[in-house]
Amino acid sequence: MTKNNSWDSVAKEYNQLIRDSGDVYHSTYLNPLVLKLLGNVKNRKILDLACGNGYFSKILANDGAIVTAVDYSKEFISIAKENANKKISFFVGSSSNLIFLDDNCFDSIISNVAFHDIKDISKTINECSRLIKPNHKLIFSIPHPAFHLSKRAKENNEYFKKVKNYVSLMTVDHHYFKGVKHYHRPIEYYCKLLFKNQFIISGFYEITTKHIGGKIIKYAKLLRHKQEIPTFLIIEATSVK
Ligand SMILES: C[S@@+](CC[C@H](N)C(=O)[O-])C[C@H]1O[C@@H](n2cnc3c(N)ncnc32)[C@H](O)[C@@H]1O
């Protein structure tokens, strides 16, 4: 898919926030665990799916991985190509149709904070199943579906999340980037697609500030709330095809 899409118009601004190491959420909450789950990447073929500005592809390539990075935004891919390691192959393409990539060709597939931004997640997970080698892993991180869309509320000097809708599929506007959509799905929905596509769930991580020793908390009163209510979910799925 090469036509303009909503991410094209915000790619430059997103890149300013993310730069070379990700924003504070990527660099403190997500990347340490994702890198640990990927293990030694040297000489391993890794797909960075919905790679955005490609900063994570570059981290992997610097660690010796042979990286294929795909995003459906032309703008993101042209930003990602700047100063990129020669070992990274970049493609503009939709995650739901990766026909230009061969079956069983990746040792790992990683997709950071993107599955909730991808409209056709069913075909995307089907493509992941086709592309991953048997007994190898797809790892993806998303904002935790149970809490992502709910507002914070304060009562008796304590913080809560006001969860209104969870089970229904919803298309919602991005809270910050105008024109960009999120696709809310309950966790069960992702699990069913994984099982249908011959993955088992081999790792499941609900990320709170407990994982990062309470870092990045500006207001002490939020500490309990941020330690008890997960911000992100990381799922590791192993192919059993
Ligand atoms: C929140 S950004 C995350 C980017 C990057 N993975 C990161 O961690 O910074 C979501 C990305 O998903 C990409 N995207 C959304 N739908 C897509 C699709 N169908 N195929 C490929 N990329 C898609 C967007 O262009 C955007 O780069």
Image (cartoon, rainbow, N blue to C red):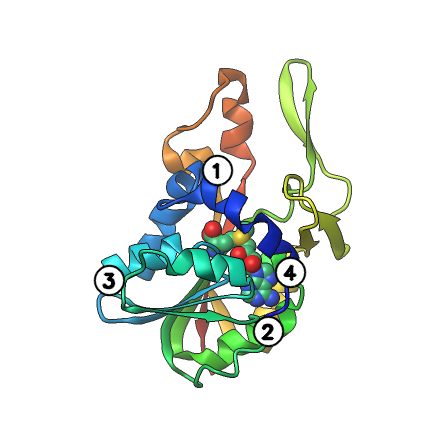
**What's the residue type where badge 4 is placed?**
Asn
Give the left or right position of residue 196, taking residue 238 as reference: right
Residue for badge 2: 96
Looking at mark 3, is its residue's CB closer than 8 Å to ligand 1?
A: no
Looking at mark 1, is its residue's CB closer than 8 Å to ligand 1?
A: no
Give the left or right position of residue 239, taking residue 94 as reference: left
Query: Where is ligand 1, by quadrant?
Result: bottom right
Q: Quadrant of the N terminus?
A: bottom right
Residue for badge 3: 40
Q: Is 157 or 100 nearer to us in this picture?
A: 100
Q: Nearer the viewer, mark 2 or mark 1?
A: 2
The numbered mark, 2 or 4, whose residue comes first in the sequence reads 4
In this rendering, the answer to whether 53 lies above or below 96 is above
Residue for badge 4: 5
Relative image position of residue 191 (x, y in whole percent) = 59, 64
- State the residue lying farthest toward the top: 157
Give the left or right position of residue 62, taking residue 236 as reference: left
Marks 4 and 3: CB-CB under 8 Å?
no
The numbered mark, 4 or 1, whose residue comes first in the sequence reads 4
Residue for badge 1: 208
Tell me the crowding category of disc 3: few under 14, some 14 to 19, or many 20 or more residues within 10 angstroms, Cα based. Answer: few
**Could you tell me which secondary element the residue under label 2 belongs to?**
loop
Residue at the image position 38 percent from the left and 42 percent from the top: 27
Relative image position of residue 173 (x, y in whole percent) = 72, 47
The numbered mark, 3 or 1, whose residue comes first in the sequence reads 3
* Label ID, residue 14: none
Q: Nearer the viewer, mark 3 or mark 2?
A: 2
Q: Is 28 or 57 nearer to us in this picture?
A: 57
Q: Nearer the viewer, mark 2 or mark 4?
A: 4
**Could you tell me which secondary element the residue under label 3 belongs to?**
loop
Looking at mark 2, is its residue's CB closer than 8 Å to ligand 1?
A: yes
The numbered mark, 4 or 3, whose residue comes first in the sequence reads 4
